[in-house]
Image: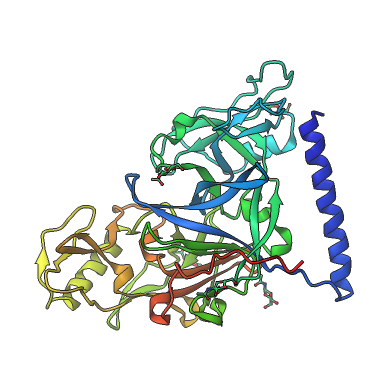
Amino acid sequence: MTTYRKMLFLLQLLVIVLAIISQEHEATAVYVRPYTSVVAAVNKHTDAFKPVYSVQIMTSYVNMQYWPSSFLIDIDAPFTWYDCIMQWNIYPGSCPSNKLCRGPASCEEFECTQVRASYSYKNPSCSPETNSSTLPGWGFCTCPVNVVSPITGSCDQALLNYDDFTVITSDGRHPFESYLGAYPFAACAPSSSLASFPANVSGVMAFSSSIYAYPAFFEPLKNTLALCIPSKPSDTGVLFIGSGPYYLLPQSNVNVRSYLSYTPLLKHKDSFGYFIKVNSIVIKKKSINAPANTTTKLSTMDPYTTLRTDIYNGVVRRFSMVTKRLRPAKPVAPFSLCFRTITSGLEVPDIDFSLPDGKKWTVTTTNSIKQVTKDVACLAFVDGGARSEPAIVIGTFQFEDNFLEFNLENSTFGFSSSLLSKQTSCANFNFTLTPSPY
Ligand SMILES: *[C@@H]1O[C@H](CO)[C@@H](O)[C@H](O)[C@H]1NC(C)=O
Ligand SMILES: *[C@@H]1O[C@H](CO)[C@@H](O)[C@H](O)[C@H]1NC(C)=O
Ligand SMILES: *[C@@H]1O[C@H](CO)[C@@H](O)[C@H](O)[C@H]1NC(C)=O
Ligand SMILES: *[C@@H]1O[C@H](CO)[C@@H](O)[C@H](O)[C@H]1NC(C)=O
Ligand SMILES: *[C@@H]1O[C@H](CO)[C@@H](O)[C@H](O)[C@H]1NC(C)=O
């Protein structure tokens, strides 16, 4: 084993021992873990060809300080990958100062086969992985894995590594001056595969249901992901791993969980992503029915809700009927229903996703209408084509300033609808560091 592997092994052992100790304490109901979640800042980027959102995670420790990198939030990705360099023999000074270096996983490793065999990045544009690559002087085969850019859709080969990501612990109210590390497998991709990414975003962090996604490495936190994405690049949203409580200012004593409605998360073949059932889309009491058994995908990489043509046409027809009093404008692609907004902001009827058990996810004006130019605003839903599968994909414009919880322990999806109606927003987490209570 290299020194790096040994260190990693010892760290993992320590974590296991600590976990056993803490479990024992919990069993006797004495020990209370002082944190309930880990927390990270979320940013919106508008400098790629579609709006995307990133999360800041600590990737290095230099000069007695943790340094964050930004990763795209991908709730579909099977594992994390980013711009890093593979080195089997990492020693002080071996890594270029503006780069991150990681230790390689070998193709003999069980996880290498598992990552490749799972429905990971299966894509017609990917060439098959081989075991033929190695690192000079290492003597083992490395583990190439395919990665598909969520921005361009192009495929590249990355190398599986032993990784190290650190996050800030929290009680849901404040970040603590105390950190928690996770050691997942991830992959080092060539810088060229990130060419179309926003500035300063160095890779893709997997938040899917895959066992190699980041949340799976925080077992005591119940494999729950909470996501609150901001509507403006200048705002900072928040991501939690942990099942709450969660607090947003100015309501310092309201657990945001109390705003959530829950619906079951569905399994979908060949995907680690998140799916729910939508029975119909309701606009001013009239429903546009989704065909029987339509599963709906939740996507952090689709900027707008995308509907199969038959459903899209029904929604647009109904929406234009209930907005007849507004002045139409020439459509601006990719949208087909636009309005002039010379005088003031528009106010349009709600669009409700009607879910099983009478639950509904309400999309109000801020999440249904996008201001595209100074005086034109459009219905921010797009036509996915006659055969688009899944028939409904709910995208990020509809997520902004909504609090979402992906609870893998109980296979539920919690959603708040717009937080603006609760006089708060995703930009309202108090990120001021507070001393750790432990
Ligand atoms: C790579 O090597 C591993 C371990 O020997 C083996 O299980 C796997 O099938 C090989 N994969 C390929 C694509 O050759
Ligand atoms: C990228 O990072 C550099 C250096 O930290 C900073 O000066 C620049 O403003 C950042 N660019 C964006 C678009 O955030
Ligand atoms: C829809 O789901 C129900 C219950 O799971 C099943 O009985 C039915 O065959 C399905 N219909 C279609 C068209 O797949
Ligand atoms: C899952 O559901 C059980 C029973 O309702 C509850 O006690 C538990 O806290 C839930 N877990 C999470 C992570 O929400
Ligand atoms: C944010 O947290 C800090 C540290 O606990 C506190 O001093 C400050 O008052 C909080 N800000 C607001 C607006 O409540």
Taking 63 as reference, is 139 left or right? Answer: right
Taking 2 as reference, is 425 left or right? Answer: left
Seen at 20% across and 69% down, the residue is: 317
Give the total of numbered labels: 0
Seen at 17% across and 71% down, the residue is: 320
Instruction: Work out whether residue 147 or residue 345 is closer to the camera in this orientation and state it.
Output: 345
**What is the quadrant of residue 234 in the picture?**
bottom left
Taking 155 as reference, is 166 left or right? Answer: right
Residue 120 seen in the figure: yes
Residue 8 is situated, as x and y percent measured from the top left of the image, at 78, 40
Taking 426 as reference, is 10 left or right? Answer: right
Residue 281 is situated, as x and y percent measured from the top left of the image, at 34, 73
Residue 395 seen in the figure: no
Up-down relation of residue 244 to residue 56 (above or below): below
**What is the quadrant of residue 266 in the picture?**
bottom right
Up-down relation of residue 85 to residue 419 (above or below): above
Seen at 40% across and 65% down, the residue is: 400
Quadrant placement of the N terminus: top right
Seen at 70% across and 32% down, the residue is: 105
Residue 90 is situated, as x and y percent measured from the top left of the image, at 70, 28
Up-down relation of residue 287 to residue 295 (above or below): below
**What is the quadrant of residue 178 in the picture?**
bottom right
Quadrant placement of the C terminus: bottom right
Instruction: Work out whether residue 338 or residue 377 is closer to the camera in this orientation and state it.
Output: 377
- Return the residue found at the far top: 137
Coloration mode: rainbow
Instruction: Work out whether residue 3 or residue 314 is closer to the camera in this orientation and state it.
Output: 3
Residue 99 is situated, as x and y percent measured from the top left of the image, at 56, 32
